[in-house]
Image: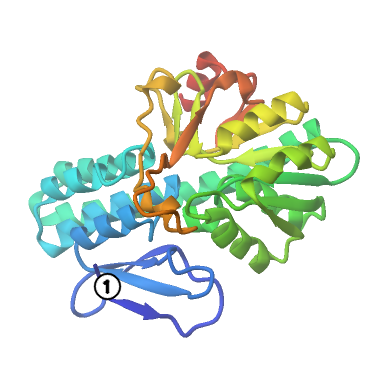
């Protein structure tokens, strides 16, 4: 893995950036495994280091993985590595988030289509285009999501429950679901952000709480299995989550624990909203049952307690929510509601 260093500057550190020091181009990542207590950056000088960062979740989140994949191709090309081999390594670093392969494919196509002496530059230009497009998508989703919340929630202000992490740490912009929450906060409409801790890696407790605190939001962290009591007490006005892959029928894969929230939301008549860019939609995956769900090491669960020696753990990284439990899918191109294959295909066109 690449070198670590801590940036001395104040302010928000971007989750990912391209730099060109004298010794050669590098991809610099904010190491999300060290947050919230340390803001440390990981410098990737080669694709192997980047793949390691992806697998360890130092860099994560569907849209950001798309950027990492695209910049990874640019890094391989600039450093003189086998770009085709790099593409294969990157595209298969994690199986569920479709954006990773999307970013790889975009930059690889630009590399292949350019003249040999311009191929590395073409790959980098394409990676930067993916980055700009993702930031624009984030802004558009925040706007569409804000209008949708205003339509669905009445009574003055929103109490929003979210799961996992969907802010600037996963995006070239301000995020997906978190971008909608952030817009509500800036307009004075956010009464409370309920943050699920999000087992097994506590990405809500570590990362969403980190982003909410930096934004000055009113937020409260809760154990994942406490969400039901919040719903029963009438303390949730809407659920906003992201997605790592959306199948053609509208089924969504997101961090494990999302599906139970959708069931709770339906029972309590609370809108359940998925916010994701169209790059997360995979029309070649027909339905939720066809989504490959990443299985992570059981030690991520057993070592938290710790559990007795020899304990086995079931540790899927994601679960799948069927379209009939989803009130709406918010994309940069508009809102899909009701969630149907035809409606999804229309916004992706």
Above or below 34: residue 73: above
What residue do we see at 56% from left, 39% from top?
A: 257
Which quadrant would residue 150 be assigned to in this image?
A: top right
Residue 196 horizontal/vertical position (percent)? 63, 49
Query: Helix or strand or loop: what does disc 1 sit on?
Result: loop
What residue do we see at 31% from left, 44% from top?
A: 94
Query: Between 178 and 104, which is closer to the camera in this rendering?
Result: 178
| Image quarter in which the N terminus is found | bottom left
What residue do we see at 58% from left, 54% from top?
A: 204
Query: Between 210 and 18, which is closer to the camera in this rendering?
Result: 210
Query: Between 238 and 80, which is closer to the camera in this rendering?
Result: 238
What residue do we see at 40% from left, 43% from top?
A: 313
Residue 39 visible from this viewpoint = yes
Disc 1 target residue: 20
- The scheme the figure's colours follow is rainbow
Residue 312 horizontal/vertical position (percent)? 37, 44
Mark 1 neighbour density, 10 Å: few (under 14) some (14–19) many (20 or more)? few
Residue 328 horizontal/vertical position (percent)? 64, 27
Q: Is residue 30 left or right of residue 70?
A: right
Residue 293 horizontal/vertical position (percent)? 38, 34
Residue 171 visible from this viewpoint = no
């Amino acid at each position: 893995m690449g070198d670590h260093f801590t940036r001395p500057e104040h302010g928000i550190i971007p989750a990912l950036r391209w730099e060109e020091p004298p010794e050669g181009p590098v991809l610099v990542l904010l190491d999300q495994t060290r947050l919230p207590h340390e803001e440390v950056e990981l410098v990737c000088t080669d694709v192997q280091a980047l793949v390691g960062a992806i697998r360890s979740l130092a860099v994560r989140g569907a849209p950001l993985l798309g950027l990492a994949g695209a910049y990874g191709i640019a890094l391989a090309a600039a450093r003189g590595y086998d770009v085709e081999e790099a593409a294969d390594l990157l595209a298969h670093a994690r199986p569920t988030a479709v954006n990773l392969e999307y970013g790889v494919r975009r930059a690889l196509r630009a590399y292949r289509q350019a003249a040999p002496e311009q191929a590395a530059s073409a790959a980098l230009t394409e990676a930067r285009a993916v980055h700009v497009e993702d930031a624009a998508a984030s802004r558009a989703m925040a706007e569409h999501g804000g209008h949708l919340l205003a339509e669905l929630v009445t009574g003055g202000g929103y109490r929003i429950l979210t799961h996992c992490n969907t802010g600037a740490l996963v995006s070239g912009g301000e995020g997906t679901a978190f971008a909608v929450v952030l817009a509500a906060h800036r307009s004075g409409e956010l009464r409370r952000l309920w943050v699920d801790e999000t087992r097994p890696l506590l990405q809500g407790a570590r990362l969403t709480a980190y982003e909410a605190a930096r934004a000055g939001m009113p937020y409260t962290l809760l154990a994942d299995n406490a969400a039901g009591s919040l719903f029963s007490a009438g303390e949730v006005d809407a659920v906003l989550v992201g997605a790592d892959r959306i199948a053609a029928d509208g089924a969504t894969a997101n961090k494990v624990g999302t599906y139970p929230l959708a069931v709770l939301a339906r029972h309590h008549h609370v809108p359940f909203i998925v916010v994701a860019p169209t790059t997360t939609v995979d029309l070649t995956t027909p339905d939720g049952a066809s989504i490959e769900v990443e299985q992570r090491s059981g030690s991520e669960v057993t070592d938290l307690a710790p559990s007795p020696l020899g304990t086995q753990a079931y540790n899927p990284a994601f679960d799948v929510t069927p379209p009939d439990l989803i009130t709406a899918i918010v994309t940069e191109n508009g809102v899909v509601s009701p969630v149907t294959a035809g409606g999804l295909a229309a916004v992706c066109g």
